[in-house]
């Protein structure tokens, strides 16, 4: 027997003996492992790393498969795999066992930030970038640290049997770790953000009332963030070990790096922001951004959808949002307009928080626009434009993307909203499932859900739940991504299939002629404070 190698033989129902009596007198905990093995295992072998005294030793336990069972326990001095320290191996074991960073900090009696640092070192040394892959590596190399750093880890049953005080003949059922959905919304106190958060929460409450996902509860880790604080919020969510990140609506310059940061952690990301750059980014970098999924089409569909709805032809102006503006937009819109019999006479990006539209309105009057289409703007910006454009609205139709979907929009805008035409590529649809959702939302929250935000986020949670029900673990990110790309689910906003460019959803009829493969492109007109749906009927 080589130096640094000890062996203990443990028969069933009798005293055992070892090759290094002094060592095993000091390490009676390993003797107990052999005693549990001979009682609980049959014809099985288990390996792990002993880290009890701050050094790593490879432990192998092998049990015979006869009537008189014998367990052989071997202890060999060894280095921890992948160049990990003992503490890093313990953190990795907790990760593999399904603990979030906060739970690991409690188990190891250290700060959560310390756990995050250890996890960064683990990723670097192993060459992986997701918690799920760390778990896979530990399973492949039998590299779990023991004594187990925490109770109720989700680890192989044979390994767990070696560290239970009482013998068992069958593996006990370990309560599964909750599935964690991290959501980050804008910190601005707006009706849209409130509706999104409530939609998420309602979906999770209903899922848990039905027993969760495959017996696993779903927990909501919700953060509010300013655009400038968005990256910090994403860092906090990934440090807490969330199994998915859901984004509210943020300005594109802030959303792009934040989404990339979440994707770098391997965690699935779902959002409904419509800036074309977001899905273009995914299309251009499928390896780095392959975990990002956009549940709807892009805002490039808004003007074609409007022109499809209008019965008359004329002169068109567009006011794209500067933060989402793409230089190719005017040319694309001009082609769509010409095909629909319209002439594009004005196209100029507007800064997101513009308050003075005097010059813009003067230009619209000069070109005699018959219709003007605005991108999705903050309500304060939209209000400023509608106020300035009021003299033109007797002869100029004003179209807005998405913003009026927020609950209470007409109450806040009053007469400014009257006659406004607006559209969305994803929102509440006229189905029994959607009507039932609206009724449940009113019953729980005592208010209206609006026509988009709450339903979209309700659906995003249920899309994740549907996919999680098809995989072994929510934190098996590779399996989750595969399911998101391959399965279809149906919610209160329509069909969810990520078949569009850059893993985005499809809009009907912009992207597909099959309404069961996407979300209907909805067009409304506000009359007397009421949203009257126009599509597919013609505007009169």
Image (tube, grey):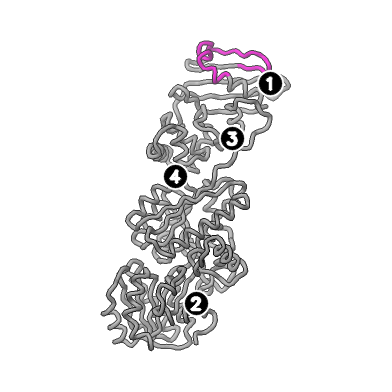
Near mark 2 (Cα within 10 A), the count class, few <14, some 14-19 or many ≥20, is many
Kindly check if marks 1 and 2 are in contact, taking CB atoms under 8 A apart as contact. Answer: no
Instruction: Check the image and report above or below for 285 versus 513.
Output: above
Q: Is residue 10 magenta?
A: yes
Tag 4 residue? 240
Residue at image position (59%, 50%) is 212
> Dividing the picture into quarters, in which one does residue 303 lie?
bottom left
Considering only order in the chain, which callout, 1 or 4, is on the residue closer to the N terminus?
A: 1
Region in magenta: 9-31
Considering only order in the chain, which callout, 2 or 1, is on the residue closer to the N terminus?
A: 1
For the residues labelled 4 and 2, the Cα–Cα distance comes to 41 Å
For the residues labelled 4 and 3, the Cα–Cα distance comes to 24 Å
Considering only order in the chain, which callout, 3 or 1, is on the residue closer to the N terminus?
A: 1
**SS at mark 3?**
loop
Residue 499 visible: no
Near mark 3 (Cα within 10 A), the count class, few <14, some 14-19 or many ≥20, is few
Kindly check if marks 4 and 2 are in contact, taking CB atoms under 8 A apart as contact. Answer: no
Identify the residue at the far left of this view. 359
From the image, state whether disc 1 or disc 2 is nearer to you. 2
Identify the residue at the far right of this view. 67
Tag 2 residue? 531
For the residues labelled 4 and 1, the Cα–Cα distance comes to 44 Å
Residue 222: image location, x then y, percent? 45, 52
Residue 536 visible: yes
Tag 3 residue? 156
Near mark 4 (Cα within 10 A), the count class, few <14, some 14-19 or many ≥20, is many
Residue 471: image location, x then y, percent? 58, 49
Tag 1 residue? 69
**SS at mark 1?**
loop
For the residues labelled 1 and 3, the Cα–Cα distance comes to 21 Å
């Amino acid at each position: 027997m080589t130096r640094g190698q000890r062996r203990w033989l443990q028969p069933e129902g009798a005293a055992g003996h070892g090759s290094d009596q002094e060592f095993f007198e000091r390490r009676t905990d390993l003797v107990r492992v052999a005693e549990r093995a001979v009682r609980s295992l049959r014809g099985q072998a288990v390996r792990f790393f002993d880290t009890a005294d701050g050094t790593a030793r490879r432990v192998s336990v092998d049990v015979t498969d006869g009537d008189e069972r014998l367990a052989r326990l071997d202890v060999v001095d060894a280095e921890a795999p992948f160049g990990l320290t003992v503490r890093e191996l313990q953190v990795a074991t907790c990760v593999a066992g399904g603990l979030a960073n906060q739970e690991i900090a409690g188990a190891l009696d250290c700060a959560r930030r310390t756990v995050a640092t250890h996890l960064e070192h683990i990723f670097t040394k192993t060459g992986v970038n997701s918690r799920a892959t760390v778990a896979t590596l530990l399973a492949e190399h039998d590299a779990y640290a023991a004594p187990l750093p925490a109770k109720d880890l989700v680890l192989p049953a044979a390994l767990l049997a070696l560290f239970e005080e009482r013998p068992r003949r069958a593996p006990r059922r370990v309560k599964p770790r909750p599935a964690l959905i991290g959501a980050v919304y804008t910190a601005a106190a707006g009706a849209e953000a409130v509706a999104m958060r409530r939609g998420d929460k309602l979906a999770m409450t209903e899922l848990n009332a039905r027993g969760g996902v495959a017996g696993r509860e779903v927990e909501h880790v919700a953060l509010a963030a300013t655009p400038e604080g968005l990256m910090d919020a994403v860092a906090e969510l990934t440090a807490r070990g969330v199994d998915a990140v859901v984004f509210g609506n943020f300005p594109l310059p802030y959303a792009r790096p934040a989404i990339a940061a979440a994707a770098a952690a391997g965690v699935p990301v779902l959002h409904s922001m419509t800036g074309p750059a977001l899905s273009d980014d995914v299309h251009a970098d499928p390896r780095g951004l392959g975990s990002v999924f956009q549940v709807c089409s892009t805002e490039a569909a808004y003007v074609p959808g409007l022109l499809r709805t209008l019965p008359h032809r004329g002169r068109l102006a567009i006011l794209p949002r500067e933060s989402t503006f793409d230089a190719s937009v005017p040319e694309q819109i001009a082609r769509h307009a010409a095909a629909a019999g319209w002439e594009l006479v004005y196209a100029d990006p507007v800064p997101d928080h513009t308050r003075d539209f005097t010059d813009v309105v003067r230009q619209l009057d000069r070109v005699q626009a018959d219709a003007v289409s605005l991108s999705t703007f903050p309500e304060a910006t939209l209000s400023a434009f509608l106020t300035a454009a009021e003299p033109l609205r007797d002869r100029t139709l004003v179209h807005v993307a998405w913003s009026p979907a927020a609950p209470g929009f007409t109450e806040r805008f009053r007469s400014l909203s009257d006659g406004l035409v607006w559209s969305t590529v994803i929102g509440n649809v006229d189905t029994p499932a959607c009507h039932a959702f609206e009724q449940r939302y009113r019953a729980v929250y005592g208010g209206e859900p609006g026509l988009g935000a709450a339903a979209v986020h309700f659906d995003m949670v249920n899309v994740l739940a549907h996919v999680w029900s098809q995989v072994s673990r929510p934190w098996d990110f590779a399996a989750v991504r595969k399911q998101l790309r391959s399965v279809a689910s149906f919610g209160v906003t329509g069909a969810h299939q990520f078949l569009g460019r850059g893993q985005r959803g499809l809009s009907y009829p912009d992207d597909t002629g099959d309404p069961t493969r996407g979300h209907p492109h909805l067009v409304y007109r506000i009359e007397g404070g009421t949203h009257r749906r126009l599509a597919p009927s013609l505007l009169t």
